[in-house]
Amino acid sequence: MKHIDIESLGLKLERILTYGQYILPEFLLVSGILVALLLALLPAEKNRYLSSAIVLLVLVAVAVLYGFQWVDTYRTGVKSLLGMLRLHTAAVTLKLLFTLTTAAVVLLSLRLSSLRQYVGEYLVLLLTALLGAVLMVMSSNLLMTYLSIEMVSIASYALTGFAFTKKSAEGGLKYILFGAVASGLMLYGMSLHYGLTGSLELGFRAVSEGELLLSFGSILMLGGFLFKLAAVPFHVWAPDVYEAAPTPVTAFFSIVPKIAGMAVLVTYTRIFLEVDMLLLSGQETVRTLLATLAILSLLLGNFSAIWQSDPKRLLAYSGIAHSGFLLAGIAAFSHLGIKSLLFYAVIYAIMNLAAFALLHWAEYRYGIRRIEDFKGLSQKAPFGSLLLLVVMVALTGLPPTAGFTAKLFVFMSLWDAYGQTGESILLWLLVFALVNTLIALFYYLKIPYFVYFKPMKDNGQAQEKPLSSLHMAVMVLVLFLLMLFFKPEWLMDFFNNASFVF
């Protein structure tokens, strides 16, 4: 009979319990998914509000746990969990942002008539996508990264079709096709890395043989990450999917998968830098590649948005342009660049959540589906129109909103990186980013123009409810955008105390 080492067994059990407490919020999310799945068996009229209430309670509890987790990681530093996940304050900050965004999306979804029969399934998919996103920002292993990205992607494919229309079915099919291609490219790139290095871990040393093949694998992996970021050239799916999906789902897509993809790209930039891509200087080549993609995303996103007549397609193309700013923060390759990137990500999430919430309100209450339908909205809904104006000004990047501050920090990080390296591509990226901020004026302010300067189409529409719950929620987001313009140090000091180990 084999002797059992009690002491070794006790150490292993203690280790498991220690790791368990670090991923307790994720266990709670899994529990929420299982509960929502069981509640989906109830009749639709009983299930709708009960499931939503329970899921909201789970999300609040998870957010509280992330708050405690942030304090713990700030005190004790970075934690590596079995070589698969890495827990640090920057990752916890993004996880908290994702959780609060998902809670807001659940609240927005309560009004969707198309979900009355399938609210349980909808909530299961939403929580599954959230779980994949929080695992993405913690991943430090190629296999874990792939599995978490696929978890987000598969749930997102299904969520696109929850409008239950022909357009949503087409959008979901396009999303699946583009996603399958991006996933295949990424997986093949990861297999090349594993085959040439024998490791799935981050931080390996590049091999001398097969260096060009390893560079090719890095480029393929980059394609998969750019797909989640909706950046050029993997942006084609975004406008159709944003237009086809229900508005709350579109809000979720525009924030959670995009920012999670940004975090993964920051993490795996370490791999790209270790590989002398195309047998040239690794850092210079990677910076040139990312800066070029950022410029293309800015140009294509902004110029395409000018010609849009659908507000969700307009925000989809603007999201591609914002991906360019996120790539610009990564291309700086500096501590200031990462801080600017996190600040921009938080402000972008607040702006987009407020924008899609107001679009959902306008669509639900006034039947507005085209930009021209906003004519004279200020006469029927003055307070909602004012909130919409501030949000559009913030998305443009104008004062006195934090949208201006976020772009300013990215510009500063680029200028600082240019001063240290002297690489001309950084200066070109800075110039294009400044010019594209001016171009954004032409389409972001198109909606306020129709709201305030065009005559009302129909006087028979319902008047605005004074201080509705949605208006109050958006007003809180708008106040954050205004306060962080005057006091950006509140958020930047928070990031100064965070670790940036992606």
Image (cartoon, rainbow, N blue to C red):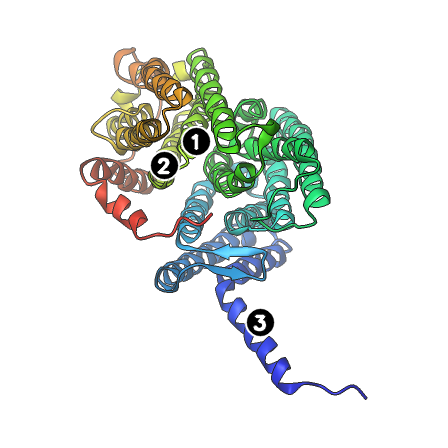
Q: Amino acid at mark 3?
A: Ile
Residue at mark 1 to residue at mark 2: CA–CA distance: 8 Å
Task: Specify few, some or many for label 3: CA neighbours under 10 Å numbering under 14, 14-19, or 20 or more.
Answer: few
Looking at the image, tell me whether mark 1 or mark 2 is earlier in sequence order: 1
Res 73 visible: yes
Q: Are marks 1 and 2 in contact (CB under 8 Å)?
A: yes
Nearer the camera: disc 3 or disc 2:
2
Circle 3 sits in a helix, a strand or a loop, which is it? helix
Q: Residue at x 69, y 30 (%)?
A: 181
Circle 2 sits in a helix, a strand or a loop, which is it? helix
Q: Which residue is mark 1?
A: 331
Task: Specify few, some or many for label 1: CA neighbours under 10 Å numbering under 14, 14-19, or 20 or more.
Answer: many
Looking at the image, tell me whether mark 3 or mark 1 is earlier in sequence order: 3
Looking at the image, tell me whether mark 3 or mark 2 is earlier in sequence order: 3
Q: Which residue is mark 3?
A: 16
Circle 1 sits in a helix, a strand or a loop, which is it? helix
Where is residue 318 drawn, in percent x and y? 43, 23
Nearer the camera: disc 3 or disc 1:
1
Residue 76 in the image: above or below residue 372:
below
Residue 179 in the image: above or below residue 373:
below
Res 50 visible: no
Where is residue 415 drawn, in percent x and y? 31, 27
Q: Residue at x 35, y 14 (%)?
A: 439
Image-based side of 101 in relation to 257, left or right: left
Image-based side of 136 in relation to 442, left or right: right
Q: Residue at x 53, y 46 (%)?
A: 133
